[in-house]
Image: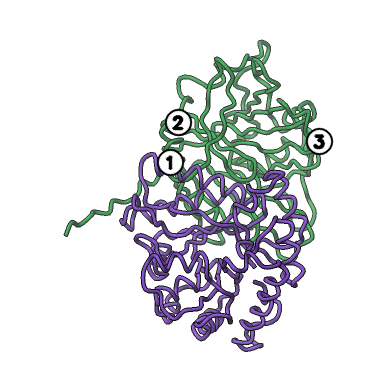
Chain colours: A purple, B green
Amino acid sequence: MDTITLAGPLEAKLRAVRGAGFTQIMLNATDIVGHPEGEAAAVKVVRASGLRVTGFQVLRDFEGLSGHLHAYKVDVAKAMLEMCRALGSRVLLACSSASPHSSQEVSLIGKDLQKLAMLAVPLNIRIAYEALSWGRHVNEFPQAWEIVQEADRANLGLALDSFHILANRTELELLQEIDPRKVFLVQLSDFMWQEIRSPEERIDTARHSRVFPGEGVHSAQVAEMVRQLDEMGYRGDYSFEVFNDDYRQLPLPVVAERARRSVKWVTDQVSRRSLPPRRKHA
Amino acid sequence: MAVQERLPEPSNPLGIDGIEFVEYTTSQPQAFGALLQKMGFAAVARHRSREVVLYRQGSMNLIVNAHGAGESTPGKAPLIAAIALRVRDAGVAFQHSLDLGAWEMPTRAAAMELHIPGIHGVGDSLVYFVDRYRDFAIYDVDFVFEKNTKSDPPALAGLHYFGVVQSIFGDRTPDWLDFYRSLFGFTVLPRGQYFGVLPKGTLLESPCHKFYLQLIEPPPGSEEIHWDEGLVRVGLGAPDIPKAVKALKDRGIVFVDHGAVQPSDKGALTQVYLDGVTFELVVSHL
């Protein structure tokens, strides 16, 4: 599960997630810095929870900047990497830039991601680069994959988010082009209307109205995506990236229970043989 | 359409020219100093204001830093805290590294002390860049040389720096290869090409061809042992290993001589001293 789906303090989120039988948690930087007793206390709570940290999010608008904007973002990235390490997370999620100041030059984007990956090496962190569906220049995973290949760094790979793929109607068959070992994280969610008509609606839906897999109207595509990744040999983590305003005003155990049902739905979509129970983490 | 010419990357972007010094930190400077003397090093200078001693042997400078080490656990093994690389221009090397994504080291120089730029390496270790090593030595600023000791003691049996061994987590070899290749211009030696008596891991050669790095992942089936990332051992080269082994044995150094590791013409490994320090000898052409 992902803490962004749940309301309340970090301790309550971790309790609810564990209570529903999950073994991992995807953390957001605001969980850590927003802790009333400070960052160190938050790290301690996470470490004591017994949950493995799937990943840490999110570094935004990093690549393609120049001059003082670039220097500023490098400082932000360093602070996020340090938090990521403190939490024992091996993955930092970096989503493609939506900044109007970012360059569209692929070589510059690649160079900046190389730099981010280099910053992450001594900290034992991998960078999962995700094509945000409203990213300014990179908004579909094939573009992100091309850049990751070109940058050619061992600890730089992809994060695949079903929402962004569905929202932009990216062909799922294009997943076959990707080396599954370079997929560092898969985030699953769905939404409840067939079509998204404008970029504004896409952002609004992404931030407020996602649902768990199996609860939305694109179940067939979500199932197909998981099946394909599994057949390709992807053996990494899945996480539910569900931003939903309703869920943030429901009791935590209720939401965690919905997430647990979604795990069952996901695993039912692929054969038991190819997705054994030990990989039912989300 | 504009065609961009792809120029080859310079093979030695930082102008690396060997190891200027290796720095250890320890809370047992006397015991470690005694070990270094057995290994053929001599204490030649002391830092003006800190508990730091410069040891030398032939071309090798070795710094023992006990400054502030009192807080660390007594009995903890001396650690390799830094490697200083000779470079063409320390400022340029430093900036180039930062541009590529290295972490800047916080400055440690006090007023009137020489500031040596550096970046973070593996674990808690640092990599310094030194460009004053020809007509002027960095030690002239911060160190006071011993009056009754030669400042340039000769090397025992031709000992010199050969390389450094770095432990890394499992599956981390590709990450660290990227680090050393992109930042410094190291090249990977073909699999199977090893020196010495511990043929494992991945060997990298410096762009100046003057020293090596060996990356070691935990051996299979070692899930139970404590394994961390860091610089674990210095390798010393010598043209004639049996001669070097004998010279060191005569000074009281004990070598491992059981199992797969035996002193040979190729190399030798000292026993573990002070709960964690070893030196490896490697037959060397350097």
Cα distance in 3D space between marks 1 and 3: 38 Å
Cα distance in 3D space between marks 3 and 2: 34 Å
Q: Secondary structure at mark 2?
A: helix
Q: Secondary structure at mark 1?
A: helix
At x 39%, y 47%, the residue is: B11
- Marks 3,2: beta carbons within 8 A: no
Q: Which residue is mark 1?
A: A71
Q: Which residue is mark 2?
A: B90
Q: Name the residue type under label 2.
A: Ala
x and y, in percent, of residue A261 in the image: 67, 80
Q: Which residue is mark 3?
A: B73
Q: Are marks 1 and 3 on the same chain?
A: no
Crowding at dot 3, Cα within 10 Å, few <14 / some 14-19 / many 20+, comes out as few
What chain is tagged by disc 1? A
Q: Is residue A208 above or below residue A259?
A: above
First along the sequence among labels 3 and 2: 3
Q: Quadrant of the C terminus of chain A?
A: bottom right
Picture disc at residue B140: none
x and y, in percent, of residue B35 in the image: 76, 32
Residue A66 vs residue B271: left or right? left
Q: Secondary structure at mark 3?
A: loop
What chain is tagged by disc 3? B
